[in-house]
Amino acid sequence: MSLILHIDTATSVGSVCLSKNGQVLQTLVNEKQQDHAASMTLFIKEVMQQQGIVPGDLDAVAVSAGPGSYTGLRVGVATAKGLCYTWEKPLIAVSTLQMMAQGVLTQTQDNNALYCPMLDARRMEVYTAIYDGGLNVIVDPHALILTPDAFGEQISKQKIYFFGNGSDKWQQLMTPNEHALFIPYILNAADMVPLATAAYEHKSFEDVAYFSPFYLKPFHSTIKK
């Protein structure tokens, strides 16, 4: 049995989801990134009230752990950690890129392909990784500066799906290849459910006090003169 609250604020679209035993009960979505800090707590309260769930009913809280927007990740992780500390619940961290791959795999049901999520990291850079049809890591998450022949080794061997808010600029830049498929995708906390449920069953929990988002790159702020 697992009743899990899922929180995602890694991109401009934030969402909250409740799941029970691996099945989605309800999802609420916010498309205004500047409102994540205010909206997430309200969404959490709303979805729990609508499902008749109180904090004591929950078994865990899961959060999209990055990579992604620095500000968004901080909001989501801080919210999840605060709830876990207050409600005395275990914290589950889910890779943002892997949950994206899970979401597209659910759409395609294509276990023979590779999956390449892409999150925009500004200019010609993306956060990306490659997973197989079993969501096993083929290429570890990393920050990549795109070139026309990036992913040449993988594309030459088999079909690969590209998706996420960084995939458009790759599609415009890449050398055309019949193995490269582009599919629309918007991040959603519901795509975290299978991964978070498996983590709960294996008791793969994070240290609430010390856990921090997986940024991939150090944060640099501009100092005003």
Image (cartoon, grey):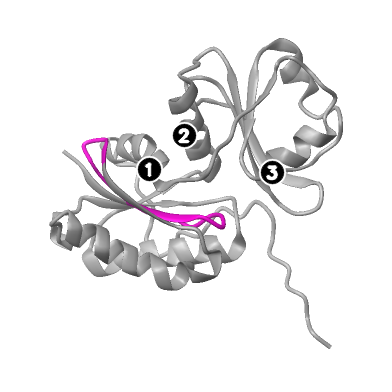
Residue 90, horizontal then vertical, whole percent? 28, 54
Q: Which of marks 3 and 1 is nearer the N terminus?
A: 3
Query: Dividing the picture into quarters, in which one does residue 172 lie?
Result: top right
Relative placement, left or right, of 5 versus 224 is: left
Q: Residue at x 71, y 52 (%)?
A: 121
Quarter of the figure that contains the N terminus: top left
Neighbor class of circle 1 (other Cα within 10 Å; few <14, some 14-19, many 20+) is: many
Relative placement, left or right, of 150 versus 102 is: right
Q: Which amino acid does label 3 sit on?
A: Gly
Write down the region rendered in magenta.
6-24
Residue 3, horizontal then vertical, whole percent? 21, 46
Location of mark 2 (residue): 103
**Residue 166, which numbered label?**
3
Q: What element carries label 3?
A: loop
Q: What residue type is labelled 1?
A: Ala
Location of mark 1 (residue): 190
Q: Do the residues labelled 2 and 1 touch (CB within 8 Å)?
A: yes
Task: Give the overall secondary structure of the magenta segment.
Answer: strand
How much space separates mark 2 and mark 3, taking CA atoms?
Answer: 16 Å
Q: Which of marks 2 and 3 is nearer the N terminus?
A: 2
Asked if one can make out residue 142 in the rendered structure from this viewpoint, the answer is no
How much space separates mark 3 and mark 1, taking CA atoms?
Answer: 21 Å
Which residue sits furthest bottom? 225
Most foreground residue, 143 or 212 = 143
Most foreground residue, 87 or 126 = 126
Q: Earlier in the sequence, mark 2 or mark 1?
A: 2
Q: Which amino acid does label 2 sit on?
A: Gly
